[in-house]
Amino acid sequence: MGIDVSDNLEARSVRTRALLLAEPTRDPDWIIVDEGFTLTREHEVESLFSIGNGHSGIRGSLAEGCPMSTPATVVAGVYVAHPGSVASLVTIPDWTHLSITVGDHTLRMDLGHNLEHRRILDFRQGIHWREWRHQDGNGRITRLRFCRLASLADRNLLVQCVWITPENYSGQIVADAHLTGLATQVVNNHTKVAVAVADRVVGPDAEEIGSSELMDGRRDFQVAAGQTYRIDRVAALYTSRETDEPDEEARRKSSEALQNLKGVIDRHRQAWLAKWREADLQIEGDHFAQQAMRFAFYHLMSSANPQDEFVSIGARGLTGAGYRGHVFWDTEIYMLPFFLLCDPAAARALVMYRYHTLPAARAKASRNGYRGALYPWESVDGEEATPPYAIAPDGEVVRILTGEQEQHISADVGYAVWNYWRATGDVSFLLNAGLEILIETARFWASRVTREDDGRYHIRRVIGPDEYHVSVDDNAYTNGMAQWNLQTAAELTALVAEQWPETWHALSCRLGLEDEERDSWIGIARDMYTGFDEKTGLFEQFRGYFELEDIDLTPYESRAAPIDILLGRERIAQSQVIKQPDVLMLIHLLWDRFPDDVRRVNFDYYEPRCDHGSSLSPAIHALLAARLGKMSLAEHYFRQSAEIDLANNMGNAAAGVHIGALGGLWQAVVFGFAGLNLNQNDPTYDPRLPAGWQRLSMRFHHRGRWHDVTLSNSGDRIQTTESVS
């Protein structure tokens, strides 16, 4: 009797597909790849290849570890404060650790011979893949594939799978995990965090196989040459913020998910594909730009949780320890516009975070002798968390004043409230949360200003976005945004009083707001000192700025060290060199308030004086340069911004990707190159595409409708087509 080879091959193919669960995306526009292995780059690579879902984030570390690795799984919104230190996002035990031993040889990157090794961050599916082919000292060759994900469909679930194929040997394999079962910790005596891990070994026929469970989370099993085996590890992560029994929920969830792992992975993949269908931005003709935009989209989406109004996004998201997970103005000014147009539910959760922390902002204002709400510069649960001191690169202990003086944050929060209302028309938010924030931030500015002999209102001793200059008077950005805050609060309270009188009566009575106070805001805004010179069209960044030393930065363009280290902090503080744009940021945010000649003269003055010591700076310069038609400069700054993480051009990606800069990069394309303007009832466009971009297509949400826009670059003109659904 003969053997039906075709049937056997088909059966084996079915088993192989069942064992795979998913396959990596290979299209280079949808992935970044790190080939080989460089030990000294490991911290940087771990940041870039992080995965997350807004509930937790996992750095892209090697499962077996290495000497320069900092594996971490952090939990959004849960901070731990150790005695004598500033609070940081809590890190749970390393559930991802898994080392493989073949006979007496543990597979490691620094032992034996690595025949192949690559890591793939798969934007399209939201999966971190790793492919490794290793030969040990005895000549045994093992092929491994790893996948890791943080479920976007069920944000409490984390998954890691490892496929193992012994190519030229049979024998025993031991898998050693640091964490099995349940681990719990209580943070700051009130928040319980629980992670439960369920695992199994699956054989070549896609059925679970028996393994001996050794001590300390080790399992051993027999393998045959040429066959593939899979280790599945599912972690469920809960906190007492979500459930009264996080440990029980974690145990139940991990066990259930393990039994339906294919469904868990499929739902996660479908959730990511849905995000891309809703709001992908496509660039034809420039692979690097396309890859950079999808890298930005991926990490921004990985950082937000539309289901939780009590967490926000830190400056490095959930990808590293930079800034300890603290929340800055980055979220409202650089990230929120992305979510407004790509994920309005996440945008709402982010602005509601500021509403829920409004009591703490009121308390901070009161402690400092002011009325209204003064939001923290670095927020942890709404409380001020700026460290009082820092160690500079040259070893000097430096006093940090931003927590006391960088007060523009209150206007930034107010701007985010208005921006959300403008983009969504969410009346419920405006009446039940947003207007109260605008009122309380306006109250702060009304109590913060001082009317002086010149009849103008001044704001003294502040720090603007440019942190090279501290304790300055009348910072243009701070004064300009305070003026805007006062005007907008007055206008919106009048609107609500007219259209929703009953709601307004209840709110004004609760807040004790009389018409006279609202009228005073209009007067303060009208008489606010702005530093604008009508003759030159320039805004002075702060009082006395134009008298400072004007240093030509051209000779320092190729520098490796920060400019304040090369020239010294004292000299920089007495110079016109700025860390990031203050005046230009004001023009960007309030674009329609300024005539074109004012925009241009200020850009031409401040652009050469900025050394981009902040990662937030290049993207805004790219945006403004594009809107002003300075295309070579716009492309230069776009690439500089994109390479902050992708090329680590600031040298600090090891602390996590720069989520704010990624939000700025997205804005540079949408508001700069595409020229999207949302200040009218319907979106308008004034596109200026780089010469190499053949076509830019984007989809965004505005006031309840999705807009599909394509900008086609024919060389001498750009054709715009739009459909609305």
Image (cartoon, helix red, strand yellow):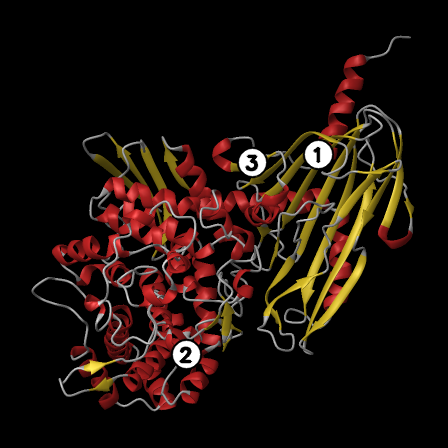
First in sequence, mark 2 or 1: give its number: 1
Assign the N terminus to one quadrant of the image.
top right
- Location of residue 204 with respect to 516 vertically, above or below: above
Q: Most extreme residue toward the left, as rendered?
A: 535
Q: Please name the residue shown 20% across and 82% down the image.
A: 457
Disc marking residue 20: 1
First in sequence, mark 1 or 3: give its number: 1
Neighbour tally class for label 2: few under 14, some 14-19, many 20 plus, Cα within 10 Å:
some
Give how far across and how far down residue 497 sits, in percent.
Answer: 27, 81
Give how far across and how far down residue 518 sits, in percent.
Answer: 24, 85
Disc marking residue 570: none
Separation of residues labelled 2 and 1 (CA atoms) = 54 Å
Q: Please name the residue shown 74% across and 28% down the image.
A: 16
Which amino acid does the dot numbered 3 rest on?
Answer: Val
Q: Please name the residue shown 81% across and 58% down the image.
A: 181
The reply to whether residue 688 is visible in this rendering is no
Separation of residues labelled 2 and 3 (CA atoms) = 43 Å
Separation of residues labelled 1 and 3 (CA atoms) = 20 Å
The reply to whether residue 373 is visible in this rendering is yes
Q: Give the structural element (helix, strand or loop) at label 2.
A: helix
Q: Is residue 201 left or right of residue 262?
A: right
Which amino acid does the dot numbered 1 rest on?
Answer: Leu
Q: Which residue is mark 2?
A: 404
First in sequence, mark 2 or 3: give its number: 3
- Location of residue 224 with respect to 273 vertically, above or below: above
Q: Give the structural element (helix, strand or loop) at label 3.
A: strand
Give how far across and how far down residue 470 sits, in percent.
Answer: 34, 72
Which amino acid does the dot numbered 2 rest on?
Answer: Glu
- Location of residue 116 with respect to 328 vertically, above or below: above
Quarter of the image for residue 544 reads bottom left
Frontmost residue, 9 versus 136: 136
